[in-house]
Image (spheres, rainbow, N blue to C red):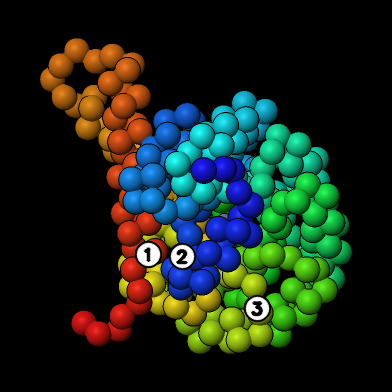
Amino acid sequence: MPLVTMKEVLQEAKEKQIGCGAFSVGNMEMVKGAIAAAEALQTPIILQIAEVRLPHSPLHMIGPLMVAAAKEAKVKVAVHLDHGTTMETIEQALEIGFTSVMFDGSTLPFAENIEMTKKVVKKAQCYGATMEAELGHVGGSEDGSHNQAILYTNPEEAHIFCEETGVDALAVAIGNAHGAYTAEPKLAFDVLEEIANVVPIPLVLHGGSGITDTDFQRCISLGVHKVNIATASFHGMVQAVEGYINKEEKHNYFDLSTAMVAGVCQNVTRHIEVFGTKYSNEI
Ligand SMILES: [Zn+2]
């Protein structure tokens, strides 16, 4: 099954009324774990890495690995740059063969976000790639370095933004935040519904780690078709490593690597199952 655009997997998810998981990766074991889960469940996924993670996993090394793994996968896989902040990195990802890029101009003034997003849409189109943008502020920050306050996406602005820029997917802020939640997140489903009513493209939920299964499914029923999972996968891998190291046996790299793959696979499997199950408010 080929490497495909994110647009294609999101369109399919929309038709099936499910969510497509977008799983962050940082090394080969994470890539292998995510793809193993997707293949076992025969479900397309998105592999992604955020620009802020590149000091640990340089794009020129992890990027080709992600693309190669996607090309060999038995399910459709899109490869995406998450939270791109510079045109330079976005171009580098597209050159490597990423089939989708995000430009995060959410901290820019509205008009400037539109201008920059338009430029990235144009660039992505040259490569036949998909483009995701963000409006409003998702809380926290991708690498946990600062705690940005949540600013809800304004539905009216979202409508204008999508019309003007021609983006393929829009990340929304509805009370979601990056990293681990310190208190139970309270999502504004009314805001999400208002946005979905005026924005025809798939919506994206960032900060997925810590949102309840029911809330995920409710978001999907209201127009979210891409759900980002990063923190839960990194935790899943570290937990699996801890489990292996705590075993009273002689350790070796190969079993350690297997444990890392299994830890990520378990987390991705769980999320794919949740995103593929329809929302029900009956208890
Ligand atoms: Zn994000």
Residue that mark 3 sits on: 200
Q: Residues within 10 Å of mark 1 (few under 14, many from 20)?
A: some
- How far apart in space, not on screen, are marks 2 and 3 (Cα)? 16 Å
The answer to whether 40 is drawn above or below residue 228 in the figure is above
User: Residue 76 vs residue 258: left or right?
Assistant: right
Kindly tell me whether residue 170 is visible in this rendering. Answer: yes
Give the amino acid type for the residue marked by disc 1 in the picture. Answer: Gly
**Where is ligand 1, by quadrant?**
bottom right
Residue that mark 1 sits on: 276
Q: Are marks 1 and 2 in contact (CB under 8 Å)?
A: yes
Residue that mark 2 sits on: 19
- How far apart in space, not on screen, are marks 1 and 2 (Cα)? 6 Å
Q: Position of residue 77 (x, y in %)?
A: 53, 47
State the SS at label 3: loop
Q: Residues within 10 Å of mark 2 (few under 14, many from 20)?
A: many
Q: Position of residue 274 (x, y in %)?
A: 34, 63
The answer to whether 25 is drawn above or below residue 274 in the figure is above
The answer to whether 233 is drawn above or below residue 112 in the figure is above
Give the amino acid type for the residue marked by disc 3 in the picture. Answer: Pro
Question: Quarter holding the C terminus?
Answer: bottom left
State the SS at label 2: loop
